[in-house]
């Protein structure tokens, strides 16, 4: 029996994990072991710190459920989510850039027609977001499904509000034959990430801003095109330069223009002042078959 020492424990553990029957799993686990051991050696990790980390992970698991993903939030604030997005979505510069999913996406949003109101009575200033979905050559993309979700004027998502069982500030829209889309919602506001869990406890011990700038989430799936997870950010919003999840990109910053009562982009009218945001999403065709995305990728 080979004695285990501080000097040989890493290679012994790597050797065991490279026995994984799936070659990619063997590669991933061997690298993970090496990096974890290197980290522990670099910082001279104490037993108390190791136990604190274990307890932190346990708390993150316990607070997570079908509506809250604390581990995605942890990945977001560590910059890992955006790193993975950037490495896996090296899109044409003309395509709409991708950003993080975030911890609050929920499958099964209701389908609404062109111009349908996903705010459905939630108080706030009416916001119409409209434009087209097209490809890199400028051709319209009909039948594109836009899965949309956002926080309310208090900065809260549906899953953060006790007693809310129905869909709230989320919906799915489908582009028309000319690639056009139009959705109605309310003007979002910047908000703090959840600070009532282990991620918040960690952030609170730093000078890191725990706020996100005002934005609306989009997940766009079209067969034959690269799936797109992105946001639209309000031009001039606070925290654009200090987004706690590193998700802001200049190409996604959109002007929100004030409008007087009258005609709206859905062909109707508004009896109260409203806000207009225009944005054309540009999708890149897949070079090969790829899976569609959703909650299964991971907030």
Image: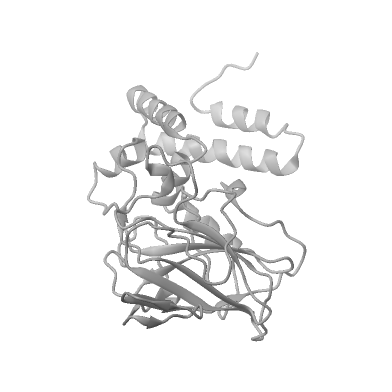
Residue 261 lies in quadrant: bottom left
For image coordinates 57% across by 55% down, the residue present is 110
> How is the model colour-coded?
one colour
The correct choice, above or below, for 40 with respect to 118 in the image is: above
Residue 79 position in % (x across, y down): 43, 54
Which of the two residues, 111 or 4, is positioned nearer the viewer here? 111
Outermost residue, top direction?
1
Residue 257 lies in quadrant: bottom left
The correct choice, above or below, for 66 with respect to 89 in the image is: above
Outermost residue, bottom direction?
138
For image coordinates 37% across by 42% down, the residue present is 161
Observer able to see residue 114: yes
Which of the two residues, 85 or 51, is positioned nearer the viewer here? 85
Which of the two residues, 164 or 240, is positioned nearer the viewer here? 164
Drawn side of residue 94 relative to residue 74, left or right: right
For image coordinates 57% across by 63% down, the residue present is 112
Q: Count of labels shown?
A: 0
The correct choice, above or below, for 211 with respect to 115 in the image is: above
Task: State which quarter of the image contains the N terminus.
Answer: top right
Observer able to see residue 8: no
Residue 27 position in % (x across, y down): 67, 43
Residue 241 lies in quadrant: bottom left
For image coordinates 59% across by 49% down, the residue present is 108
Residue 272 position in % (x across, y down): 32, 74
Which of the two residues, 82 or 299, is positioned nearer the viewer here? 299
Drawn side of residue 56 relative to residue 92, left or right: left
The correct choice, above or below, for 140 with respect to 87 in the image is: below
Residue 250 position in % (x across, y down): 41, 75
């Amino acid at each position: 029996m080979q004695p285990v020492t501080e000097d040989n424990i890493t290679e012994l553990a790597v050797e065991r994990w490279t026995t994984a029957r799936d070659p990619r799993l063997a590669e991933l686990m061997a690298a993970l072991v090496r990096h974890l051991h290197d980290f522990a050696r670099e910082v001279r990790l104490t037993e108390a710190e190791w136990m604190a980390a274990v307890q932190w992970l346990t708390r993150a698991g316990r607070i997570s459920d079908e509506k809250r993903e604390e581990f995605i939030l942890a990945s977001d604030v560590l910059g890992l989510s955006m790193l993975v997005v950037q490495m896996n979505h090296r899109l044409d510069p003309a395509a709409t850039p991708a950003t993080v999913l975030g911890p609050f996406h929920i499958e099964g949003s209701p389908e609404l027609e062109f111009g349908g109101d996903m705010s459905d009575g939630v108080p706030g200033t009416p916001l119409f977001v409209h434009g087209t979905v097209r490809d890199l050559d400028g051709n319209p993309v009909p039948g594109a499904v836009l899965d949309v979700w956002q926080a309310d004027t208090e900065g809260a998502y549906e899953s953060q509000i006790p007693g809310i069982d129905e869909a709230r500030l989320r919906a799915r829209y489908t582009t028309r034959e000319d690639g056009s889309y139009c959705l109605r919602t309310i003007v979002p506001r910047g908000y703090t990430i959840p600070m009532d869990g282990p991620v918040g406890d960690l952030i609170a011990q730093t000078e890191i801003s725990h706020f996100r700038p005002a934005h609306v989430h989009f997940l766009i799936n079209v067969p034959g095109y690269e799936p797109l997870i992105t946001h639209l950010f309000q031009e001039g919003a606070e925290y654009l330069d200090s987004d706690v999840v590193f998700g802001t990109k200049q190409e996604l910053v959109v002007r929100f223009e004030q409008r007087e009562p009258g005609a709206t982009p859905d062909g109707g009218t508004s009896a109260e002042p409203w806000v207009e945001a225009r944005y054309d999403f540009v999708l890149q065709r897949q070079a090969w078959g790829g899976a569609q995305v959703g909650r299964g990728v991971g907030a």
